[in-house]
Image (tube, grey):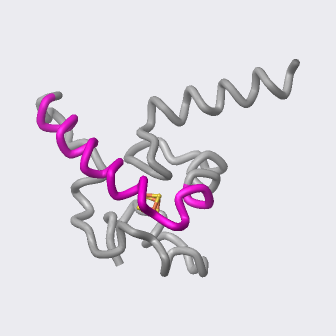
Amino acid sequence: MTHGRRCAVRLGNRAWVDQAACRDEDPEMFFRVDGERPESWHARLAEAKDVCMVCEVRATCLEDALAKPEKHGVFGGLDEEERKLELKRRARLAAA
Ligand code: SF4
């Protein structure tokens, strides 16, 4: 199991986690380290997103992360700020 102790891959007993593309990746790739320089994080973030983009369970992972919601890390190909925006977008659609 990978993607760190906070990872969807580690947290659940869901069937879909066995199909996660990140299961053999370094967990550190998906989470920003406190005090890390932006350029370092952005490089890892791009790598993490590349893994997510080929993941068969990306949509399921994203929905899971949005539902919790996960506050940190990359899930479903989105970082925490992008997930916040997605939740706001959905709220606006629901209110329309
Ligand atoms: S979408 Fe990304 S974070 Fe989610 S299971 Fe797939 S590779 Fe891991």
Residue positioned most to the right: 96
Give the total of numbered labels.
0
Query: Residue 69 at what x, y percent from top left?
Result: 58, 46
Query: Residue 86 at what x, y percent from top left?
Result: 60, 32
Q: In which quarter of the image is ligand 1?
A: bottom left
Query: Residue 92 at what x, y percent from top left?
Result: 76, 21
Query: Residue 42 at what x, y percent from top left?
Result: 22, 35
Task: Determine if the magenta segment contains residue 48.
Answer: yes
Task: Determine if the magenta segment contains residue 73.
Answer: no
Q: Which residue is drawn at 64% across and 52% down?
A: 63
The quarter of the rendered structure image containing the C terminus is top right
Describe residue 89's horizontal placement relative to residue 22 as left or right.
right
Q: Write down the region rendered in magenta.
A: 39-61
Q: Is residue 56 above or below residue 83?
A: below
The quarter of the rendered structure image containing the N terminus is bottom left
Majority secondary structure of magenta residues: helix
Q: In which quarter of the image is residue 59?
A: bottom right
Q: Quadrant of residue 7?
A: bottom left
Q: In this view, does 93 lie above or below 10?
A: above
Q: Residue at x 75, y 27 (%)?
A: 91
Tell which of 53 and 22 is nearer to you: 53
Q: Is residue 64 above or below residue 14?
A: above
Q: Residue at x 49, y 77 (%)?
A: 19
Q: Residue at x 17, y 28 (%)?
A: 38
Q: In which quarter of the image is residue 61?
A: bottom right
